[in-house]
Image (cartoon, rainbow, N blue to C red):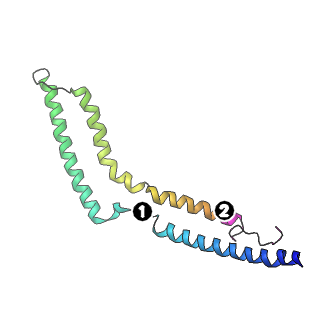
Amino acid sequence: MGDWLVDNLIVGILNWFAKTIIGALNALWDLLSATVFVSPDVTQLPQVTAFASTSLGIVNVCYVLAFLWVAILVMGRDTIQAKVGPGELIPRLIIGLIGANFAIPRRGRSRPGAGGVSARVRAALSAERSMLGGNGGSHGSPSC
């Protein structure tokens, strides 16, 4: 009688309890990954695009002034005393100008950090669930 009790009743109750706990944890994880672990794409908001375009205009004006200063340094050669020469300024200005003008389009295409990690973990968990038959890891047979 002890074997029947252990095999059928206790293992059945433990399997049911494990399925219930795993189901609740999966539901909690799905809720958290859909709400908390998601970073919204703020580059589509009108306030952000307006601020970014205004900032980019200011940065481009500053770069025009910096290129004019480099041109004055080149024309003045040794008559203007400067600690930094055109050979050091021109590559930095070009890299900075390219970086400033491609920062917002690049940010719009890149996946936010927390949202990307959450999506990968959610995909891995759902793949594991589908491999296990969708019952959360419990094989349903009480013959452990």
Q: Of the residues shown, which amino acid type is indicated by label 2? A: Glu
Q: Earlier in the sequence, mark 2 or mark 1?
A: 1
In the figure, 120 relative to 93: above or below? below
- Which of these two is toward me, 132 or 103? 132
Residue 47 falls in which quadrant of the image?
bottom left
Q: Is residue 23 left or right of residue 44?
A: right
Residue 137 in magenta?
A: yes
Q: Is residue 96 left or right of residue 17?
A: left
Q: Residue at x 49, y 69 (%)?
A: 34
Q: Which residue is denoted by mark 1 in the rendering?
A: 39
Residue at mark 2 to residue at mark 1: CA–CA distance: 25 Å
Residue 79 falls in which quadrant of the image?
top left
Q: Is residue 112 left or right of residue 120?
A: left
> Given the current orientation, which residue lies at the most extreme top position?
78
- Which of these two is toward me, 138 or 74? 138
In the figure, 80 relative to 100: above or below? above
Q: Which residue is denoted by mark 2 in the rendering?
A: 128
How many numbered marks have been drawn onto this rendered protein structure? Answer: 2
- Please give the label number shown on residue 15: none
Q: Residue at x 26, y 28 (%)?
A: 88
Magenta span covers which residues? Answer: 128-144
Q: Of the residues shown, which amino acid type is indicated by label 1? A: Ser
For the N terminus, the image quarter is bottom right
> Given the current orientation, which residue lies at the most extreme front position?
2
